[in-house]
Image (cartoon, coloured by chain):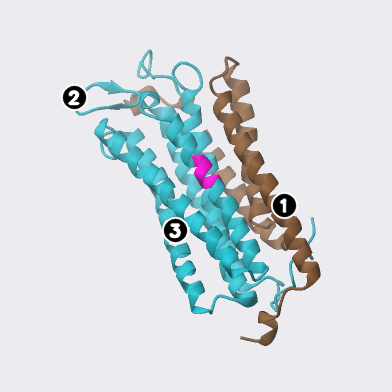
């Protein structure tokens, strides 16, 4: 191992790490609060479409918050972000295609008996 | 968004360490893998909304089987383990090996609690009559959550090995921090997959009197 790989971190880097540390704590509290809100939401007497929309948004918010901060994508090279976004796009496209192919409204009921 | 915040660029053509790049590529492929599993579960839930038939021949509904308190607890545990993992990575970057060990022990502990909850849930479901063979719901549910659980188990094993490896004195410097960061990426990925499963598989079953999919009883097959 080269000596540069074991050099002590610079003061600037330590300050940045401390700043991130505080971001992580704030984010963890947010994640706990949003998860609690999700559980409360499903028992509220409001239209199902509204609940589903809000649940999806909350879930997506948590998903991207973890990716961006905990997984350092917000601090790292953009290439990593694009790799993951490309995978997400493919995943969503697969889901949409499956949904279209197997839409229950278009299926003849005899095929699912 | 800053690209300069990390200590320095790796001496590679992309400026990204190969280990980290490979891990991200693996996570991208794993993302598609879980995407198909979740899609399959949701599609079959829509096609077969009527639940399953237990050993006595009674029609059962998944809404009566799920335990939202238990699932919420395990979700919270996994989220907090992700937080501790972020702290462990941060500690390694600062060269604070004792702090790293404390945090990673917390992650292992929370990971084991999550696995315990999953084993309890599977056992409970099995005794209630939901098996991997007796319904489409059982097949897709166990395959999806079981695959996720396997990922958690691999993550726990990886972190246990890393914890003991840290005592050899070889886990240090930039390369040590990179190894921990790669393990952390894997652990956070397991967490984000559960975020989606929690909403798409569990929470939607509680919407409305019979869940989002209904019971399928009035006119499942005309």
Give the brown chain's letter.
A
Residue B140, horizontal then vertical, whole percent: 38, 39
Q: Determine whether, in the image, residue B184 is placed left or right of residue B159.
A: right
Residue B156 is marked as: 3
Circles 3 and 2: CB distance less than 8 Å? no
Q: CA distance from mark 1 to mark 3?
A: 25 Å
Q: Which residues are magenta?
A: B75-79
Among the two numbered marks 3 and 2 on one chain, the one whose residue lies closer to the N terminus? 2
Q: Which residue is mark 1?
A: A22
Residue B174, placed above or below residue A14: below
Secondary structure type for disc 1: helix
Which numbered disc, 3 or 2, marks the residue closer to the eye?
Answer: 3
Q: Which residue is mark 2?
A: B56
Q: Main secondary structure of the magenta part?
A: helix
Give the cyan chain's letter.
B
Q: Nearer the viewer, residue A69 or B101?
A: B101
């Amino acid at each position: 191992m080269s000596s540069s790989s074991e050099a002590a971190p610079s003061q600037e880097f330590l300050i940045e790490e401390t700043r991130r540390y505080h971001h992580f704590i704030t984010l963890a509290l947010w994640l706990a609060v949003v998860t609690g809100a999700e559980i409360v939401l499903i028992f509220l007497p409001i239209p199902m479409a509204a609940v589903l929309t809000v649940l999806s948004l909350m879930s997506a918010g948590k998903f991207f918050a973890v990716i961006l901060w905990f997984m350092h994508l917000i601090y790292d090279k953009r290439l990593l972000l694009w790799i993951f976004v490309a995978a997400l796009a493919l995943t969503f496209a697969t889901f949409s295609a499956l949904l279209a192919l197997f839409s229950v409204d278009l299926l003849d009921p005899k095929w699912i008996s | 968004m800053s690209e300069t915040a990390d200590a320095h660029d790796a001496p590679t053509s992309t400026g990204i360490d190969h280990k980290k790049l490979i891990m991200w590529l693996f996570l991208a492929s794993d993302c598609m893998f879980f995407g198909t599993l979740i899609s399959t579960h949701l599609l079959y839930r829509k096609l077969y909304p009527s639940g399953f038939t237990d050993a006595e021949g009674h029609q059962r509904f998944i809404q009566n089987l799920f335990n939202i308190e238990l699932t919420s607890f395990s979700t919270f545990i996994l989220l907090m383990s992700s937080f501790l993992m972020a702290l462990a990575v941060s500690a390694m970057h600062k060269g604070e090996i004792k702090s790293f060990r404390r945090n990673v022990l917390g992650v292992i502990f929370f990971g084991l609690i999550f696995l315990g909850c999953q084993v309890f849930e599977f056992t409970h479901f099995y005794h209630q009559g939901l098996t991997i063979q007796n319904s489409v719901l059982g097949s897709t549910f166990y395959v999806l959550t079981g695959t996720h659980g396997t990922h958690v188990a691999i993550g726990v094993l990886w972190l246990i090995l890393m914890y003991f490896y840290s005592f050899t004195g070889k886990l240090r410097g930039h390369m040590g921090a990179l190894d921990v960061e790669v393990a952390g990426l894997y652990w956070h990925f397991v967490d984000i997959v559960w975020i989606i499963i929690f909403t798409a598989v569990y929470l939607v079953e509680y919407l409305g009197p019979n869940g989002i999919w209904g019971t399928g009883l009035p006119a499942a097959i005309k």
